[in-house]
Amino acid sequence: MQTGSWVTTLQNHGMFIDRQNDVMTMAIFDYDSEGRATWSYGVGTIDGNVVSAELYSYDEIVCISEPCDRTAATRRGSVTMLVFPNELLATYVDALPSPSVRADTFRYNRLDFQRPAELDVPDHAPLPDFAGNWLGGFTGDATRPDDLRSVTITYEGGTGIGAITEWYFDVFATASGDYLYTIFCSDLDPTRAPRCRVSMFYDDSTCSTDFTYRSVGVDRLQVPATCSGPAGSAESSFHLYRTDS
């Protein structure tokens, strides 16, 4: 049988199983009639195609007078399983607390993850999640001040440039709604890792940066940049800090 998530007809209930050689662990996720989680854990040795295990839950304990372990185990009954390659039968004893559960034996099947046929298969790597509100821009130098401001970024789709498609995000000043610049991303150049690029034109200079998809964090981006102007080129950096998380 395979490691993974297993489900049965019982609502708000499931099991995660991990098997290594003849040892199997199980995490049973269940809820009582009040909606409170009653998760329990067990480990057993498979004998033929049968495994039995004592089940325990773990609750945080508080010690006042002296340090102690964070959790204490509480026995939650037991389970005996008849294991097959693609299904199992589990019989519980004193392990499912909800009074609405009137049976003690359930047939489980492994949860099979499949992409729905009606969804298109993407032809590119997942794009960085830029859409939303950020504080962002290029840092300045001796000839130009920082340009960090509140911006709103919207996803605008893809556009063809020769044989390569780029997906782009437009950046607007949050306060005024004025267009500022565009972030272009592409992964169709086989000689490079998936990358994004930004160019920002000022009155007398241009700042630009080029970075990989994996440089973009959940709520932060900070990458090197270059600004060029009448005084020559200077090293800078491009920043985005998400403000709507």
Image (spheres, rainbow, N blue to C red):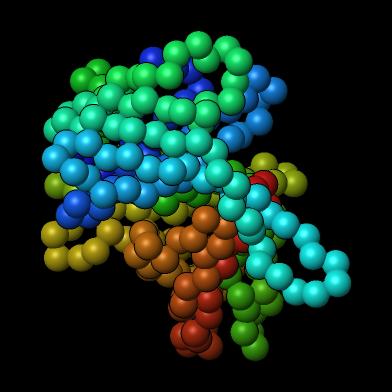
In the displayed structure, does residue 28 sit left or right of residue 243? left
- Is residue 168 at least partly visible in the picture? no
Residue at 80 percent across and 75 percent down: it is: 66
* Residue 3, above or below 219: above
User: In front here: 213 or 206?
Assistant: 213
x, y percentage for residue 114? 24, 28
Residue at 19 percent across and 52 percent down: it is: 22
* Residue 89, above or below 222: above
Residue at 25 percent across and 44 percent down: it is: 3
Numbered disc total:
0
User: In front here: 13 or 81?
Assistant: 81
In the displayed structure, does residue 219 sit left or right of residue 212? right
* Residue 123, above or below 114: below
In the displayed structure, does residue 230 sit left or right of residue 243? left
x, y percentage for residue 113? 27, 31
Residue at 47 percent across and 42 percent down: it is: 55
If the image is split into quadrants, where does the N terminus sit? top left
x, y percentage for residue 72? 63, 56
x, y percentage for residue 148? 67, 65
Asked where in the image residue 143 lies, by quadrant, the reply is: bottom right
- Is residue 194 at least partly visible in the picture? yes
- Pick out the residue farthest to the right: 65
User: In front here: 70 or 157?
Assistant: 70
